[in-house]
Every structure is written in structure tokens, then in C-alpha cells.
Image (cartoon, grey):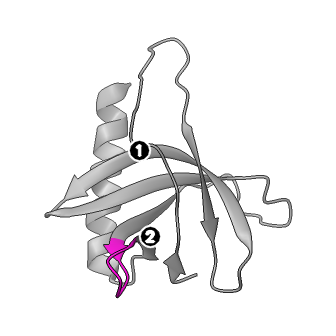
Amino acid sequence: MTEHDHDHDHEHEHDQEAEEFDTIILTDDEGKDHEFLHLDTLEVDGSTYFVLMPINEQDDEEADEAIILKLGHDENGNEMLLDIENDEEWEKVADAWENLEDEEE
């Protein structure tokens, strides 16, 4: 999955007792929809990243692992989510999310 169309709401209400997450539906390159929980949005080095958890991926062994996608734009200026292909960039964003999670505990 390299490019993804997405539709989501940026409003977040954080409740210390029970946190609710927005649901995002992403369409892969083959036109198949995948549903995710939007766990967090990160700003790292001037770029925006979404931390997502797959929902109802029955045949996927990694369904319980969060994924991180970078917010980008297509040739028409429409927002889209992209895989992070640079290992150094991915490590930096993953570390930022881990640090944020540690601070919240």
C-alpha cells in the first residue's frame, strides 16, 4: 500500500477514563477499503504522521500492531496517506510516538 485516500475528522476529545478514537477508512491501490482507528497525529520535522490501528483484519497476523503513515498530497493537492519508505524517518517518528505514549502513562 503506497497511496491511500482518507476521510477523517480532526476534532478530538480526550477523556482520561475512556478514550474514543476516530475511525478512518483507507482505500488501497487495488480499491479495497480498510478500516482503522486513528490513535494519534504526530508532527515530526515539519511533517504530519497518523498512527493507526487496523480494525477487523481477520487474516492479518499483524492486525494488533499500530501502523504509522505520512500525510502527503497527490498531484491534484488532495490529502493522502503514504507509507514511510525511509528507515531513518520511520525510526524517528516511531520513537516520537513511543515517547508520547510513555508521557501519557
Q: Write the residue at 50% across / 81% down.
A: 3
Between disc 2 and disc 1, the foreground one is 2
Lateral position of residue 47 relative to residue 70, left or right? left
**Magenta stretch holds residue 90:** no
- Closer-to-camera residue (25/70): 25
Lateral position of residue 6 relative to residue 59, left or right? left
**SS under mark 2:** strand
Vertical position of residue 102 compared to residue 56: above or below: above
**Magenta stretch holds residue 74:** yes
Under mark 1, the amino acid is Asp
Residue 26: x, y in percent? 60, 65
- Closer-to-camera residue (88/17): 17
Q: Please, which residue is most extreme toward the right here?
A: 59
- Closer-to-camera residue (64/70): 70
Question: Principal SS element in the magenta part?
Answer: loop
The quarter in which the C terminus is drawn is top left
Under mark 2, the amino acid is Leu
Lateral position of residue 59 relative to residue 74, left or right? right
Residue pointed to by mark 2? 81
Q: Mark 2 or mark 1: which comes first in sequence?
A: 1
Residue pointed to by mark 1? 40
Q: Write the residue at 51% across / 46% down.
A: 38
Residue 103: x, y in percent? 29, 30
Lateral position of residue 40 relative to residue 33, left or right? left
Query: From which residue to which does the magenta span run?
Result: 72-78
Residue 49: x, y in percent? 34, 60
